[in-house]
Image: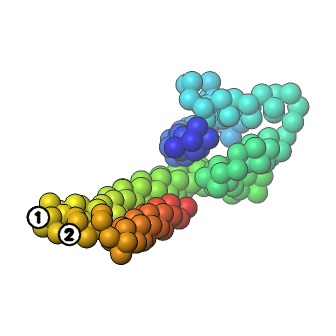
Amino acid sequence: MTRMRRAERLLDQQLPGAAAGLARSVHAGATLLGAIEEFGSVSAQPISFDLATIAASVRRGGSLDAALRDWELSRANCSVGVLVAACRFGHAEGGNLAAALDGAAVSLLDRLEVADEARALSTQARSSSAVLVALPLFGAAGFSILDPAVAATLFTTTAGWICLVLGLGLDALGALVLSRMVRSALR
């Protein structure tokens, strides 16, 4: 997994807790900015740094709405977009901010659970594809051990070499196709 994907996954894991923490603060009577400042100062997680940056931008004279939009644009992550939409709905549009943040927390947690389930299922698919790719190789080796005439045919005749090369090529192609199928299912 690349460094960027790991950072994105870490952010995705922290967003439900951040949304729930913001909702708790708002339920307790804090403003959205107060909740962002509080959550941004309590831990050293990457999400806290992002929220502290938003609060610092507002303290320098920017609007909270603009700071939230800037955060959303700086993180090309739809989960950040969900949290920003909830914040903007409650803050800029005058909706029930605490309920919007609670809903965002639940939605982000559900999204995280679905992604974890997809990863688990893709692990099963990768294992199955490894077995499918290895089976012809083990089959050829097993038959060659059981019957030396098979080995002699495969390794001493032109037709045998053609079958080996063609079989290995098709096996490699199958491995490539299965790998791409599993990767595309995770997107």
Whether residue 145 is visible, yes or no, is: yes
Quick one: 87 or 142, which is closer to the camera? 142
Could you say whether the residue bearing mark 1 is in a helix, strand or loop? helix
Residue at the extreme left of the image, as rendered:
146
Which of the two marks, 1 or 2, is nearer to us in this view? Answer: 2
Residue at the extreme right of the image, as rendered:
61
Q: Quadrant of residue 43?
A: top right
Whether residue 22 is visible, yes or no, is: no
Q: Is residue 37 above or below residue 89?
A: above
Please name the amino acid that badge 2 sits on.
Val
Q: Give me the residue at 48% from left, 63% from top.
A: 176
Q: How many marks?
A: 2
Question: Does residue 52 appear left or right of residue 179 in this picture?
Answer: right
Image quarter of the C terminus: bottom right
Could you say whether the residue bearing mark 2 is in a helix, strand or loop? helix
Q: Is residue 73 above or below residue 10?
A: below
Please name the amino acid that badge 1 sits on.
Leu
Q: Give me the residue at 20% from left, 69% from top.
A: 150
Q: Quadrant of residue 48?
A: top right
Q: Give the residue number, with chain letter if any, for mark 1.
A: 146
Q: Give me the residue at 34% from left, 63% from top.
A: 133
Q: Position of residue 92 (x, y in %)?
A: 78, 52
Q: Give the residue number, with chain letter if any, for mark 2.
A: 150
- Inter-mark Cα distance, 1 to 2: 8 Å
Q: Are marks 1 and 2 in contact (CB under 8 Å)?
A: yes
Q: Give me the residue at 37% from left, 68% from top.
A: 161
